[in-house]
Amino acid sequence: NAGVTQTPKFQVLKTGQSMTLQCAQDMNHNSMYWYRQDPGMGLRLIYYSASEGTTDKGEVPNGYNVSRLNKREFSLRLESAAPSQTSVYFCASASGWGNTIYFGEGSWLTVV
Amino acid sequence: AQRVTQPEKLLSVFKGAPVELKCNYSYSGSPELFWYVQYSRQRLQLLLRHISRESIKGFTADLNKGETSFHLKKPFAQEEDSAMYYCALKEGSSNTGKLIFGQGTTLQVKP
């Protein structure tokens, strides 16, 4: 029972490099999310996708782009990484309104 | 604006002591609130939600609309309760299930 799977688990980038975080869920959920977790800040929503084919900005979208490739997959791209994007990134999914959100295991990203 | 506040970054108690993790929210409508827990090096997982009015792992949380609070309580803490706890508020106007999280409280249960 995989649930929400995200890759890579760890990544070190140099400032200005680009990378994509991959996320897939096998629960047939409509909604998917990307959060970042920073000490003292809790989890902040970067982008979300309410359904296949739609994406919307969350609280902290600057410096990121997303793609909802299909119902299963929701990727997060950093076009030009900055040290401020050093964080732990969590992908999550939910079947929709009012339902439990399930999280991936997290991706630790360091930008030097 | 909708907001969730967890005033304590760290709560340290001894095993067997009562625990109360505080959560206050700001929301004009009828809130839907959750507690999520993250054990060391594990993914966040739902601990409980107020509409279920259930007790999970001995934890309970009661919604107090007058005080706009949703504190998490356990009468006798166990060492395995040590974790990061997040209070979350579902964004009421959307049907996307988006959550607004508090800053998190680390619970440390000492032997």
Image (cartoon, coloured by chain):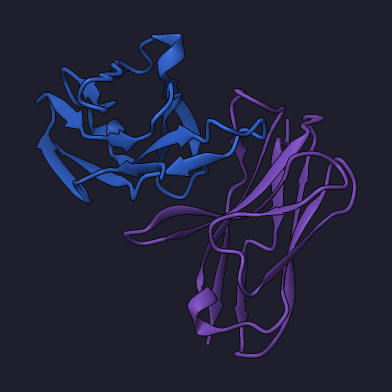
Which chain is displayed in purple in the rendered image? A
| Residue occupying the point 19% across, 49% down | B10
Quick one: B93 or A22, which is closer to the camera?
A: B93
Left or right placement of residue B104 versus residue B92 in this view: left
| Residue occupying the point 78% across, 33% down | A30
A78 to A33, vertically: above or below: below
At which x and y percent is residue A7?
71, 59
A101 to A8, vertically: above or below: above
Which chain is displayed in blue in the rendered image? B
Quick one: B59 or A67, which is closer to the camera?
A: A67
At which x and y percent is residue B47?
43, 26
Left or right placement of residue B10 versus residue B94 in this view: left
Quarter of the image where the C terminus of chain B is located: top left
| Residue B58 position by quadrant | top left
| Residue occupying the point 59% across, 26% down | A100
Quarter of the image where the N terminus of chain B is located: top left
Question: Number of labelled discs?
Answer: 0
| Residue A97 position by quadrant | top right
At which x and y percent is residue B70?
29, 26
At which x and y percent is residue A39?
35, 62
| Residue occupying the point 47% across, 42% down | B100
